[in-house]
């Protein structure tokens, strides 16, 4: 009995000595301390949590801007991986046979610092039951200018593709006016058919000009997320129309053009809120 008590006493003394030492060891471990600080910062900063919600889509999908001087380009996604690695790590590095691609036409409508906002009407979708009037892509480290048309390519890895992260993404490619590059070139009608809208306070002036003179009709619609602000059909290759009492809300102007040479063309110009005293050039597609 006395022997058992001695053994128990030794165990108790050992635990008393070791527990504070182990606690001190973990407290002084730099790696564990760094992890704790990061967790504390994220959970205590409400702004960081809110901001992360808007970043989740960009990080999980990726957005890649193709450099105008290179067919490889640079990626703005944190998960883009190394282009020099022979093993594919992102959807951008997969061979084309493993990737579904869909091209859209977009346009830079705003730029703050190095961040561009791009309107892509054909990618508009329903979010929480509310239909977008246009789909907006935010692109960091942007070398584009307001008004520049771009090709937006949606990339999705096929089910039989090697596992990569991100497995889907968007590729932004500026159009080139030089047909000698690997970049997409602007279609011939781009310098022939033009749409501009001048926002003048509460009024907007729509200007359409087809220098070929071959436009048969143009159906114009201006709308925001709530209602149609203006609609009308014109039978001329050149006209100006004034729309009054335009609310200070994001809106889009859409045109369906019937042209004897180019067939049916679609033009759109997206105006964000506070667009007064600004001129927006429309982007066209077939």
Image (cartoon, rainbow, N blue to C red):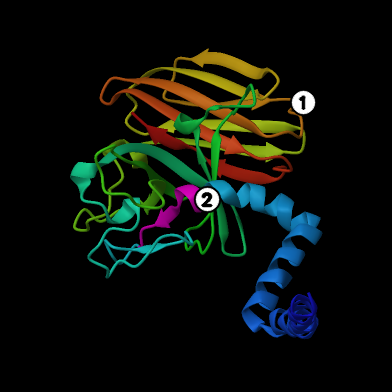
Q: Residue at x 24, y 39 (%)?
A: 160
Q: Secondary structure under badge 1?
A: loop
Along the line of sight, the residue nearer the viewer: 182 or 193:
182
Q: Secondary structure under badge 2?
A: helix
Please name the residue that numbered disc 1 is placed on. Answer: 245
> Which span of residues is magenta-colored?
59-67
Identity of the residue furthest to the front in this view: 1
x, y percent for residue 259: 33, 21
Where is the C terminus found, in terms of image quarters?
top left
Q: Does 112 sit above or below residue 212?
A: below
Where is the N terminus found, in terms of image quarters?
bottom right
Say which label, 1 or 2, has the lower sequence index.
2
| Residue 147 in sight | no
Along the line of sight, the residue nearer the viewer: 63 or 143:
63
Q: Does 102 sit above or below residue 78?
A: above
Q: Residue at x 77, y 56 (%)?
A: 47
């Amino acid at each position: 009995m006395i022997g058992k008590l001695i053994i128990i006493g030794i165990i108790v003394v050992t635990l008393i000595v070791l527990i504070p030492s182990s606690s001190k060891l973990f407290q002084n471990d730099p790696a564990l301390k760094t992890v704790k600080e990061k967790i504390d910062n994220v959970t205590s900063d409400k702004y960081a949590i809110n901001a992360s919600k808007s970043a989740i889509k960009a990080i999980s999908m990726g957005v890649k801007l193709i450099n105008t001087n290179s067919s490889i380009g640079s990626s703005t996604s944190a998960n883009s991986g190394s282009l020099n690695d022979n093993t594919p790590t992102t959807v951008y590095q997969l061979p084309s046979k493993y990737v579904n691609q869909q091209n859209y036409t977009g346009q830079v409508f705003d730029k703050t610092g190095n961040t561009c906002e791009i309107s892509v009407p054909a990618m508009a979708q329903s979010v929480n039951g509310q239909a977008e009037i246009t789909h907006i892509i935010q692109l960091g480290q942007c070398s584009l200018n307001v008004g520049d048309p771009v090709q937006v390519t949606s990339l999705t890895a096929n089910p039989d593709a090697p596992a990569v992260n991100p497995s889907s993404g968007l590729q932004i490619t500026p159009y080139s006016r030089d047909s000698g590059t690997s970049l997409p070139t602007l279609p011939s009608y781009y310098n022939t058919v033009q749409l501009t809208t001048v926002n003048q306070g509460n009024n907007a002036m729509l200007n359409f000009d087809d220098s070929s003179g071959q436009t048969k009709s143009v159906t114009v619609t201006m709308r925001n997320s709530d209602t149609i602000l203006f609609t009308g059909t014109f039978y001329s290759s050149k006209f100006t129309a004034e729309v009054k009492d335009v609310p200070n809300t994001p809106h889009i102007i859409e045109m369906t053009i019937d042209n004897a040479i180019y067939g049916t063309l679609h033009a759109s110009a997206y105006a964000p809120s506070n667009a007064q005293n600004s001129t927006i050039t429309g982007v066209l597609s077939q």
